[in-house]
Image (spheres, helix red, strand yellow):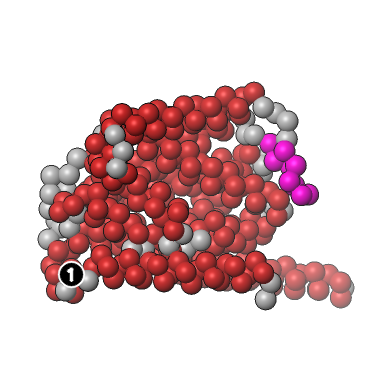
Amino acid sequence: MTGKRIFAWAMIIIGFGLAGYLLYAGLRQYTFADIVSSVQAIPPANLAMALAFAAGSYLCLTFFDWAGVLYVGGRLAYPKIALASFLALSIGQSVGLAGLSSGAIRYRYYAHWGLDAEAVAKIVLLSGVTVGLGLAVLGGMVMILNPSDTAGVLRLSESTVMMIGIGLLVASLLYVVLAAAVRTPLKIWKWTFAMPTWQVAVMQIIVGTINFALVSACLREVMAASADVSYLKAATAFVLANVAILITHAPGGLGVLEVTVKHVMGDQASIGALVAFRVVYFLIPLAIGLPLSLITEAVFRSRKSRSSDTVSSGSAA
């Protein structure tokens, strides 16, 4: 086993261990009956809206990959890009180490459609940058519009939080400026990376921000069933939870998301709302993505087998 694989497995084990501990710490005060009754208290209308926002987010995520394919100059139809994106993220966001797991799944599909390893690496990299830009822009906005909640969690003054928010927005704008001005590629090992065009950079900011805004709306919808939760507070909780998830690398943010949101929202975050959010945004897409990936793999193998049979028949003739 190579050093990289050992490191990856170590990170997975540590991530699951941390996630398990945080989940236990956050849920130990509740019985199973408490959790079930809390989930059942969420009106169907709220769950339906949460599902709609989650679907909107996964649709938005497909444009992360679309921007990446544009960046590498690929010529793939949108349905193929959407399929690779959904399968990669519906599975990768739940199993942890999303950059590696979703990257491996993306490579399986994009390589099948003719893209090489360098192109796939660039798509994954650009998608990661889009995540960072979306989180930075939404985070900057909530820090400016709702500095008190972030200040309370980070133990900073509201003015400091607002300055951080302004800095995040300025940094995102600077990214667009650099995309327009810097055209000299950067060479790392055998691969060459260049800034995207400013049009792609703007697209990254738009789709990245809309994605996180939709997920925040999904979270707010399940919480609003039991408490009067403002959208800004839900968005603040989700942004801070994502920062904690990025730091800990917990699989699917398991435990980290729940504990962070509970810390920010207090009693407004019922256990039922937190469980419902995880089911809606992580488990339902995973339940769709896993069998769909198996079906797609079977189709790939069937086509490859038919292609091999055709070549063999032609050789024999």
Q: Residue at x 65, y 52 (%)?
A: 120
Does the magenta portion include 187? Answer: yes
Q: Residue at x 63, y 70 (%)?
A: 5
Image spot of residue 33 (x, y percent) = 14, 74
Does the magenta portion include 303? Answer: no
Quick check: 263 above or below 312? above
The amino acid at mark 1 is: Gln
Q: Is residue 123 left or right of residue 88?
A: right
Report the span colored magenta: 186-194
Q: Residue at x 53, y 27 (%)?
A: 174
Quick check: 200 above or below 96? above
Image spot of residue 150 (x, y percent) = 29, 40
**Res. 282 visible in picture:** no
Quick check: 75 above or below 226? above
Image spot of residue 313 (x, y percent) = 81, 73
Give the prevailing secondary structure in the magenta stretch.
strand
Q: Nearer the viewer, residue 227 or 4?
A: 4
| Secondary-structure class at tag 1 | loop
In this figure, which residue is indicated by the disc labeled 1?
29
Q: Is residue 35 left or right of residue 157?
A: left
Q: Residue at x 35, y 59 (%)?
A: 256
**Res. 112 visible in picture:** yes
Q: Is residue 232 left or right of residue 299?
A: left
